[in-house]
Image (cartoon, rainbow, N blue to C red):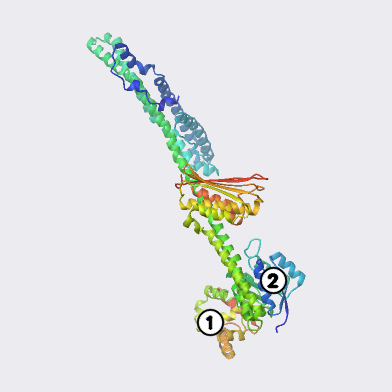
Amino acid sequence: MGDWAHERIPATTIDRQPPVNAYEMWQSVTAGFRDARTWRGMLFVVVSFFVHLALFVFALALLAVSVPLVAIGVGIPLTVWSHAAIDRFVGFERGRARRLGHDVTAPPAPSGSMWERFRSGSRWRTAGLALTIWFPTLLLFVLLVVVWAIPLFALSVPIWGWALDTPWIRLALTALIGAALLPLAPWASLGIGRLVAQLIGFVGSRSRLVAAEAEVAEVSQNRDEILTAVTSERRRIERNLHDGVQQQLVALGIDLGLAEAKMATDPEAAATLLADARRKARESIGELRVIGRGLHPAILGDRGLDAALSAAVASSTVPVELRTDLEVQPPLDVQEAAYFVVSEALTNVMKHADANLAVVDVTTSEGHLHVSIYDDGKGGATLAGTGAGGGLSGIGARVRGLGGTFDLNSPKGGPTTIAVAIPLEGRS
Amino acid sequence: MNEPLRAVVADDSVLLRDGLVRLLAEDSIEVVAAVGDADALLVAVDKHDPDLAIVDVRMPPTHTDEGIRAALALRTLHPALRIVVLSQYVEERYAADLLAGDTSGVGYLLKDRVVDIADFLASVRRVADGGSAIDAEVVSQILQRTRRVDELDRLTPREREVLAALAEGLSNRGIGEKLVISQGAVEKHISNVFTKLDLEPEDGQHRRVLAVLTYLRQP
């Protein structure tokens, strides 16, 4: 039933060549009647009229009973039930709209307490739709009837008109007008059918609102995930500073203090202490560099993703094969996310996987940056709390925050694959 | 030479543990056990019955206030044990927990203080002798948050310095050295502070600290 609504009418029937003989003329005038699409379109309008009428009566009856009862409480579960029933009915229309080629997504069924379900915006919208869609359908149905009734009535006038003593010339003229108008009826029917299809497609446009709502919900969930990831990241940095560098500096200070105290009495011991202190200073600097790199890999800005990945791979204790194929340089935030995906994944490989080999593959294609990290280790990696500060789940949140996808496949016994795709041009 | 003491050190950083062991050895404080977490600390104290415990606030598993909780447990289990708690940063709430009861034989110091070896060892000795050692940072936070600002305004700047030194747990001599004033002047300032703030004159050093802290924290 769906194909006619979007099909272009073949050029042969629209851009008609001037008819050369009576037969071709007859052919072209009657083409609309012989075209199955005309009758299917009309059937579609008639079916829609009755479906929408039934939907209207159904929704009105349910809501007229349940909504007033809200006053005494019973109405709330009753309304929720009515909404579900109406939604099921509208689902039938969604199916038809889809078959007509409209992109219609059903809103997710509301969840939570009875009250939250009662208040669900998408359900009330669906109910509103069920109550109103009948009116435009009715108008279009009437229009369809009129489009056929006028020429048919005009044609029928001579049959009963002579009985009323009407002058034959008027009868003939009326019949002629009817005969002229009748070939237009199929085209008008097809147009009306399209309008009804558009109307049902409107179910889809309504649902796009719902889709937008769902996206907002997803975005806000992503935001929450990012906030959590940021917090745990900050906690990790704070811990690295307080438990790492600060401790080292205190230990270094002790060495210096002791050296100072021994300088006069035991210069040899003091020299040893100073050497210790120097070593600790060097270690602290190294530690600070690691923490700094964890905050933002400076090499990304200087040399780009390729160089940063080489550096990340070089510091791995597990042999890593790095393959990069970047047709374009991704935006900096995408590069940074990719860098952290790789370095966090490799950290996990080193710490937990017991692997002999890892393969990092970074490519751009179809508007996305694809990153995959494979290792032949023992698998069993999870998103929960691997590594300091949430590890993989943290970078998962980061990737999703950029509108990307994050997949972890790590069966017990291995191997482990992490596949990430991030859109190059912001959120889709 | 000071009286030899036996101590247990609890800190999850091996580096710092080693540093502390060497440092304490300078003052003939023998470290009989150096451990990395609170549970091991409780076990070590039970086993060695030391005079002194030096405890890091942040230790595994949660790296929050394990040290404080261990210290409070030790205060109950081993009332004679002297405890110095070391903290990466000033957290008045930790100090308040620790100093809520008796401040005798308790210290709460920033880790940075360890680097000033002589001062640190003096603080440790003060705690070992039953006194208290409260970090100047903590004291200044308490002074800032006290609701008794009006009453403190009655003190001269010098008297306020003496009050802060009192709260840190310093002895009269320590206060004199810190502020570079004579013993007589210290005694005079202290008696002025106690009079102006309507505090009972206290003899014992830790009781003085207690009086001052209690006064400052009272609403």
- Quarter of the picture containing the N terminus of chain B is bottom right
Residue A371 in the image: state x and y as whole percent. 54, 47
Q: Which chain is indicated by disc 2?
A: B
Viewer-nearest residue: A66 or B70: B70
* Quadrant of the image occupied by residue B192: bottom right
Callout 2 secondary element: strand
Residue A285 in the image: state x and y as whole percent. 56, 66
Q: Nearer the viewer, mark 1 or mark 2?
A: 2
Q: What residue did someone put label 1 on?
A: B160
Residue A240 in view of the camera:
yes
Residue A104 in the image: state x and y as whole percent. 46, 35
Depicted A407 relative to depicted A278: above or below? above
Q: What residue did someone put label 2 on?
A: B9
Q: Residue at x 45, y 34 (%)?
A: A103
Mark 2 and mark 1 in contact (Cβ < 8 Å)? no
- Quarter of the picture containing the C terminus of chain B is bottom right
Amino acid beneath label 1:
Arg
Depicted B199 relative to depicted A343: above or below? below
Viewer-nearest residue: A128 or A403: A403
Q: Residue at x 32, y 17 (%)?
A: A182
* Quadrant of the image occupied by residue A246: bottom right
